[in-house]
Amino acid sequence: MSSNVSPRAELLIAPRELAAALGLLEAPKPPRPFAAAPIIVDTRPAESFAQGHIPGAIHLDLWGFSLIDTDAAPLRAFLWMIHHVLEQRGINADRPVVVYEDTSGIRAARVWWFLEYFGHPDARVLDGGFSGWVDARLPVTRDAVAPRPVEWKASPRADRVAGWKDVALRLDSPDAVMLDTRSDDEYTGRVARATRGGAIPGAAHVEWTRNLAADGSFRSDAELREMYERAGVTEGRDVIAYCQGGYRAAHGYLALRLLGYPRVRNYLGSWKEWGDREELPIASKAD
């Protein structure tokens, strides 16, 4: 990251800033200018995209592309598949990327996380999402843009992803913390979405929705930092975020990256894998 720009300015962009960068509005441009025209990626369902989207946006819905086995071979195959899909949508490191959904939600955060994992130098989330864009009375279109496939010689960052073995090795480490981003019912085990219900032993619990303000944008850095530090998720620890399948975990990951946390990972297999592997320990607080 640039030394004179905050992590938030590096990773998020406001609707009016994006509109100004696209030449759609006379307004201040983002603190970190784009080096080239950005690719705008709409991560909402196809029917939402068809009803209206940001001009020039391409559609990319990765919902349902999940992994439940993070052993080396299936993890490698899954990430290869995602990389190939990104290439087919015209995404590589040559142009900046801005991803969005209805709000600053988990669909956008997850696609953004994949871009970060593959080493993209400038990937951002539209803070407030399409709702924020519409509320700012910015242009909307139904015209579709056909993406042009490209090649991307990515530089994957192994320190940004975790498998079940990475989690198991750190369970008893005081320098590490597991961040559970699921609902209260999932965390306590009252709702089981795997063979077993519960949580990874010792996990801190901050549901992903708590990262957002009422308008669907990210809460301030001060609010986020106070919330996470109170939960024991501090900047000096190795943090591994998890949920059910790496979606909500990507949102927690992004929230911590906004704060400048240097060592954060997304456990892609998350509870579906951990809860199904009966040899792995769990904690349950269900009544």
Image (spheres, rainbow, N blue to C red):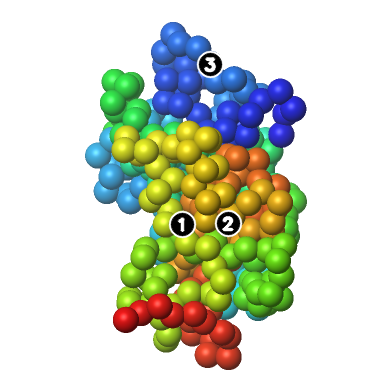
Pick out the residue farthest to the front: 230
Above or below residue 98? Residue 237 is below
Q: Quadrant of residue 10?
A: top right
Residue shown at 54% from the left, 68% from the top: 203
- Marks 2 and 3, the one that precedes in the sequence: 3
Amino acid under label 2?
Gly
Instruction: Find the residue positioned furthest to the left.
Output: 51
The residue carrying mark 1 is 206
Q: Secondary structure at mark 3?
A: loop
Distance between the Cα atoms at labels 2 and 3?
Answer: 36 Å
Where, quadrant-wise, is the C terminus in this rendering? bottom left
Q: Of circles 1 and 2, which is in front?
A: 2
Q: Rate crowding at label 1 as few (under 14), some (14 to 19) or many (20 or more) other CA atoms within 10 Å.
A: many
Q: Are marks 2 and 3 in contact (CB under 8 Å)?
A: no
Which amino acid does the dot numbered 1 rest on? Answer: Val
Q: Residue furthest top?
A: 26
Q: Give neighbour class at mark 2: few <14, some 14-19, many 20+ (Cα, 10 Å).
A: some
Q: Position of residue 48 (x, y in %)?
A: 28, 45
Q: Position of residue 46 (x, y in %)?
A: 32, 49
Asked whether 69 or 49 is in front, the reply is: 69
Q: Is residue 263 rendered to the left or right of residue 114?
A: right
Give coordinates of residue 100: x percent, y percent.
43, 40
Callout count: 3
Above or below residue 269? Residue 55 is: above
- Check disc 3 and give the amino acid type: Lys
Q: Give the residue at mark 2.
A: 232
Q: Residue at x 42, y 86 (%)?
A: 195
Residue picked out by circle 3: 29
Name which of mark 1 and mark 2 comes first in the sequence.
Answer: 1
Say above or below: 29 vs 105. above
* 140 to 170, vertically: above or below: above
